[in-house]
Amino acid sequence: MFYKLEDFANNYYLTVFINLLIFSTILLIIPMCLFFLIIIIKPKIKNTSNIYLYAISSGMLLIVATVGFLKDSYFDLEFVIHKNQLFTNNSSLEQFIIMIIVASGSLFGIILMFLIRFIYLKFILNKKSNLQKNNDQITKNKSSVLTVLLFGCYKIISGFILGTIIANVSVNKSMNISLLITFNFLLLVELLIIYYRQIQYKQSKQRAIIYNLSIVSLFILSMFIGAFLNSIINSGWWLIPLIKSTAGTILVFVVITEFIYEFIHLRNKSKKEWYLTLIFLALAMIITLLLLSFNLYESDIKIINNNINIDNENGSHYHNHAH
């Protein structure tokens, strides 16, 4: 499905560029077609359906953030440290370094989220409020636009990470087909939640579509940037894990502050609606876990084998993590 260096006379940038075009086409064509089909059939949905969509999105994205990005951040660090024998026979120092890198990425993600919120609320929204006297519309603009800004930030960083994966595939790694399926499914859900959130807060259909297309365009652009900078990024063994930690933390932040907020109030209302919401949330988490379980990378296999060898040779049970 994807080309290797030898297919283009070892021309790295041409190989990466062609693979990016292939991957972008595969990634976008099905979700985008389904997205436009759904919004043509259902330009608006009931409030109850919207809540269930929030629950499904929250369940999926929380698992992607934690079991996906944050777990990979720890896992990648362990693999690189063991492969290069950076802290031989010093497990305490190894865990301390891993802790610092992952925590630094998370802290950066949190600071970035608060900074975006502060700039938007303090400068952009306040400026609009001075021009508009309709407080209700200002609140709706805040709820719709802020989500786009925060979620767009996550998509830019995740696109950057995905670009590095495509670059690695171009060199010597294989692409897991289930990874493509997972990204297709997630992208469709993300497009729908952003669209219907805009409609929920009385934004026009055209604006909702423009927001979605803008996020997708930034995502693809960052994917190309990540792919072409991959050789530079790989020179810093800690950089990709740091970025994954940032992406995971941002996604958790967005889900908790923007999506869960939309249905958590149901716990004080109808028991039937609340339990149905929880069921959708749980099912989304389970389905996403199943999808991610098929996305075991080559590096994951290597580190598992490496840890087993270390345990066998040294009699140590230090790395008996639940990976």
Image (tube, grey):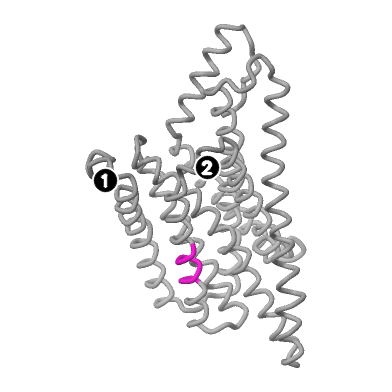
Residue at image location 72% in from the left, 92% down from the top: 132
Horizontal and vertical percent for residue 163? 44, 50
- Quickly name the residue at label 1: 1
The N terminus appears in which quarter of the rendering?
top left
56 over 96 or under it: above or below: below
Crowd band around label 2 with a 10 angstrom C-alpha radius: few (<14), some (14–19), many (20+): some
Camera-nearest residue between 201 and 176: 176
Camera-nearest residue between 129 and 85: 85
Q: In which quarter of the image is residue 176?
A: top left
- Quickly name the residue at label 2: 289
Q: Quadrant of residue 145?
A: bottom right
Disc tally is: 2
Horizontal and vertical percent for residue 104? 71, 43
Q: How far apart are marks 2 and 1 (CA)?
A: 26 Å
Camera-nearest residue between 38 and 136: 136
Horizontal and vertical percent for residue 67? 58, 41
Q: What secondary structure is the stretch in magenta mostly built from?
A: helix
Under mark 2, the amino acid is Leu
What is the number of the mark on residue 301?
none
156 over 243 or under it: above or below: below
